[in-house]
Amino acid sequence: MVNRSADPTTPLPRFPADFVWGASTAAYQIEGAAEEDGKGPSIWDAFVRRPGAVRDGHTGATACDHYHRFGEDVALMRRLGLDAYRFSVSWPRVLPSGTGRVEPRGLDFYDRLVDALLDAGIEPTPTLFHWDLPQALEDQGGWMSRDTAYRLGEYAAVVAERLGDRVRRWITLNEPFVHMSFGYGFGVHAPGRALLLGAVPVAHHQLLGHGLAVAAIRAAAGPDGTQVLIANNCSPVRLRPDAASEADRLAADAYDTLHNRLFNDPLLTGSYPDLSVYGLSDPSWGGIVRDEDLKVIAAPLDGLGINYYNPSWITAPADPASGLPFDLVEPQETYRRTAFDWPVVPDGLTDLLLGLKARYGEALPPVWITENGCSEPAGLDDAARVDYLAGHVDAVARARAQGVDVRGYFTWSLLDNFEWAEGYHQRFGLVEVDFATQARTPRASFEWYRALIAAQKPQKS
Ligand code: FCB
């Protein structure tokens, strides 16, 4: 089915002129230069060497070589008409051992990138932590250790002191849920630890680090117009029509608690949801959550970043001995699937946004879609991606029309890049990258997004 907004003869949805249109990337996925200019090793540099960890043994050692080609990439962004660009700062490039000695050449790189973006009229929107923890900190326990939260605060201060005179919008963490569950729960991402529910302290330590980073950014960058956000991966939870018993509903609630509420409630309400279904019935989780931590975590935010890809369908566990109070299942309905086999469900994004407003009310700050996009087969004529983006931009417009204050939309991703455990097999870019030659070629979706942005801002076209 062709989405009506993807049809060039129908008008594109209209957003206010100050709505921010962006694209997102992350350091390990695009920069390459893994051992250059004094950069220390990250957990991803180590993980990709493990046999079988990444499909076909791909690594991000060169990736898109953005470290050397950022000028060309900023020129592409300018052509696209982006208002803002979300990238991440590589912690081990700035602090090779995670703490202590600062590597000036690492900071210089982000300084040059920020200046190039500002010259192109694009707002730099850095994320401080997009999963590439310095290996030296992992060796001391990584996010299972409370100490890592304090190290994030220190690192945030170093970066904000250098860039805070020019960066107005900051993102602390990327998807603490995915980092906890994939990295420490199941071990399919770095650091590759399979602690299952034993990974829950990783949630608290990341959130504490977030709160300390917010304070450090505000102190270094000053109050004038500085905005601090976090980018949470959120997934609306759905029941299958054929599995909607009370047990299924309880399972769905348990999943919602783990994926969504564990990361949104403390930020927006200053308290954790009840985790007794996960065996943590005492509010301190056995001493992990200390007095005053929630005050640090709930420091006011200027915006909540939402990364949305698809809903989650949940049933009661088929095997009660599975150790988890839910099963993640496939939907009964037939949806178009991306190359990653993810179902394409734009109305899930509207539901998610309306659900956040219903749940948090006045406590919900302005929302930013900090990631949304799809993996499609290689090639320039990516009509399926255009259809995906059009459907999801429409979904945002529908939520706005129903009163959700969404201020911006960042698509994932500007470029094809290193897609974690999938290596280079999943292509999310508006721009195709030939990884043998590093040639960049805009796809049809690039032209579609350019036209969409231009239509919202006639003065820019
Ligand atoms: C998100 C990640 C991002 C990218 C997309 C496809 O979970 O934040 O780095 O891998 O998925």
Image: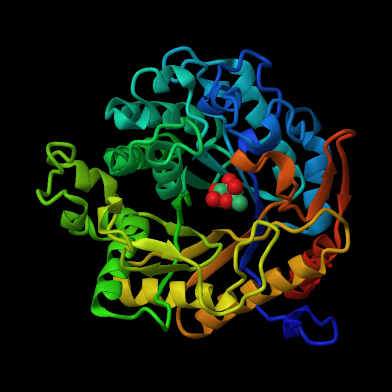
> Can see residue 208?
yes
Quarter assignment of residue 290:
top left
- Residue lying at 55% horizontally and 80% vertically, measured from the top left: 333
Q: Residue furthest left?
A: 282
Residue 224 rendering spot, x and y as whole percentages: 46, 48
**Rendered position, 316 above or below 4:** above
Q: How did the renderer colour the structure? A: rainbow
Q: How many marks?
A: 0
Viewer-proximal residue, 116 or 375?
375
- Residue lying at 47% horizontally and 26% vertically, measured from the top left: 158
Residue 267 rendering spot, x and y as whole percentages: 30, 54
Residue 153 rendering spot, x and y as whole percentages: 37, 31
> Can see residue 58?
no
Q: Is residue 149 left or right of residue 440?
A: left
Question: Which quarter of the rendered picture does the C terminus lie within?
Answer: bottom right
- Residue lying at 62% horizontally and 75% vertically, measured from the top left: 335
